[in-house]
Amino acid sequence: MRASVEVRGIVQGVGFRPFIHRLVERHGLEGWVRNTSEGAELEVEGGRAAVGAFVREISAEAPPLALIESVEVAELPGSGGYGGFRIIESGRGEEMRTLVSPDTGICADCLRELLDPADRRYRYPFINCTNCGPRFTIIKSVPYDRAYTSMSDFPMCPDCAREFADIRDRRYHAQPDCCPECGPEVFFLDAVGRRMTGDAIETARGCLKAGKIICVKGLGGMHLACLAGDEAACSELRRRKQRDEKPFAVMCRSVECAKRICRVTEVEERLLVSHKKPIVLLEKLGRGAWAHLSENNSIGVMLPYTPLHVLLMGGDIDCLVMTSANLSDTPIIYKNSEAIDRLGGIADGFLLHNREIVTRCDDSLMRVFEGREYPLRRSRGYVPYPVIVPGLAGGLLACGAEQKASFCMSKPGHAFPSQHIGDLKNAETLEAYEGQIAHFERLFDIKPRAIACDLHPDYLSTAYAEERSEREGISLLRVQHHHAHLAACMADNGLEGECLGLIWDGVGLGTDGTAWGGELLRGSYSGFERLGSIHPLLLPGGDAAVKDIWRLGLSAAVESGADTGEIAAGPEVGAVKLMISKRVSCPESSGMGRLFDAACSLAGIRQSCTYEGQGAVLLEAAASVDEDGEYEARFYVRDGLEVFDWRPMVRDIISERCSGIAKSVVAARFMNTLVSAAVKMAEKAADMTHLHRIVLSGGVFQNMYLMNRLPGRLRAAGLEVFTHSRVSANDEGLSLGQLRILEAKYVLGGATENCRD
């Protein structure tokens, strides 16, 4: 039998051709293979059973870094007369359009060699092969050849060159392949940037054991590290970095070390040890434990994902704080010179190397929910893997929002969400954002022909989209924030047609010019209708209320007609009450995130926040998981909109707080009430619209107290529930939704320039 085989997916730079060569030899076949714009194309000839087994094993046994989307087979007439098996090289034009693999953690084979005294790469911190190592962060251009990566600075020695050329070797065409003779080197600098003599890694280990803070260069940027069990060192790191309370991520030497501080389920363990090696948010073994690392009930844990990390941990350092090395509201530092200049006074030393990081890429942050990944930050190990969308139009750019900024681009059938960029609040982050858009365009050979952005006029991402649209004459679509969230979750789950969407977040500009954020929508990619919301809350002082959340608690109490004498005291209270009564500098918001902040204040848990979302995080952490009680959920109708009226609930919260009910009970009852209110609104909407699919999106749905209760209640009410698994529920994921809406409006619907969603 002679057959053509077309393989679509990520197959370049991941050991795919050696894998095909081994399969061909195993089954006694002849033919050829070459890369194409979609993946790879093959012709094979041999016995019918052998060809069939060969085709089945392409997907079943593919290399770990390959992403096989489809394998299509067509029988060919006659004989090919191949006379063996060969690899046909593709032209640069073809390979410009192939997909690119993410960076991945060290594989078991390389780990074994790293720790083998007899191996020529023993303790070499840049060991890699076709199954692991840097990819996305070292690529300057495509095709993925060494000449187009930062490894071009390191010509291969004869031994590495032989491996690279041997199709039977694990390092065949492994572009970052190197060894101590020809590859990068690691070095240690003291606090003022002077290079130290001796073993760099052992010097760094000695500093850590002495309670010092060091900067460590990883795959996509720098980390600041100290011993996780050293409370004094962690406190000093917080002081120097001005990160008073935001949780620290930690790197554990092994799963066993992680289990000494956290509960680790079987699914979480598989994710921890996977080649993606994300940070996984795990439940602490005890409430209140490791409070110097995290003030809530979870800790973000990752395992060593580079050989340098493995050597740094050694056999005796169980757990290190590994927090991104950046200054407030700026992207992660990734250049050696920048680290020395900007981290002076923070780091006591620098463990660096001379392999350039081309593209900064933060660690990914994941939860496990209902047995699958639930992204909180999608970055290293995942980007630039595409989201497969059959039939998707190419040439589209979606610019995302402001917080947790990302963008998304399309090629036919593929959406490419970017890595985590950060909050777009300053010129430095905007520069990184613009640079990554340009890099993706080069990497994937995309020239945008239409752009989508958020409806909010003051976002820097909106300004970028508007300026580029004007400069290049590209059609621009402004997309309502919560419609984008709905569409993102639909796209994440491959849904078409209409759905209901429960979209809860902090804030997004509504089509009526007010701040939305506690919304029930019906919609599709082509449009939406607002069915429900929450009673608006005044934000005294605007952005000041997001930090000083006692203002929100006071505002909710005043709006509810409750006695505020028991809940607020201080020199500013009178002035804020006056602001509320006169509605001066008090924008309205239906944001669910702000209601969480108000409840956190009213429950007596926290009165001010030092990082975004802290009130909601602490409210969740405080809640008693065994509490089933709830407050009354009331509703009213305003202009056809079903509105959850939280005012009776607020009066009950204040009453219970004044009567001495535990904060943990109040927090749980607050969230239980929200669950019941959401179910009632969704049931009514389903009866009215005859839609029974509902998506859950928005940053509030990072709250696991809600997620462990709400989907089950919705399913019991007869609804089919869809949640995120490929992009984040928070604003980082909504660029995917913007992209699908742009396609529906521009490509399918013929939208004109400068239109609104």
Image (spheres, helix red, strand yellow):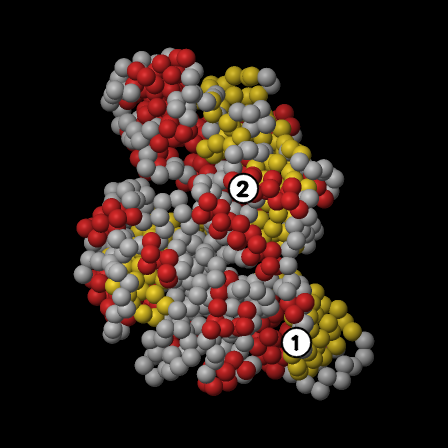
Q: Any mark on residue 461, and which?
A: 2
Q: Is residue 270 visible?
A: no
> Hey, which quadrant is residue 350 in on the image?
bottom left
Q: Is residue 89 visible?
A: yes
Q: Where does residue 41 sit, x and y in percent of width and height?
A: 68, 70
SS state under label 2: helix
Q: Any mark on residue 415, and which?
A: none
Q: State the residue at coordinates (67%, 72%).
A: 91
Q: Is residue 83 above or below residue 706?
A: below
Left or right of 464 in this view: 357: left
> Hey, which quadrant is residue 108 in on the image?
bottom left
Q: State the residue at coordinates (42%, 50%).
A: 331
Amino acid type for the residue under numbered disc 1: Glu
SS state under label 1: loop
Q: State the residue at coordinates (39%, 69%).
A: 354
Q: Where does residue 155 sit, x and y in percent of width and height?
A: 48, 78
Q: CA distance from mark 2 to mark 1?
A: 40 Å
Towards the viewer: 163 or 301 = 163
Q: Where does residue 402 sit, x and y in percent of width and height?
A: 49, 40
Quadrant of the frame with the N terminus: bottom right
Amino acid type for the residue under numbered disc 2: Ser
Query: Are there few (<14), some (14-19), or many (20+) residues within 10 Å of tag 2?
Result: many
The total of numbered circles placed on residues is: 2
Q: Which residue is mark 1?
A: 89
Left or right of 28 in this view: 572: left
Q: Earlier in the sequence, mark 2 or mark 1?
A: 1
Q: Is residue 606 above or below residue 649?
A: below
Query: Are there few (<14), some (14-19), or many (20+) residues within 10 Å of tag 1?
Result: few
Left or right of 633 in this view: 263: left
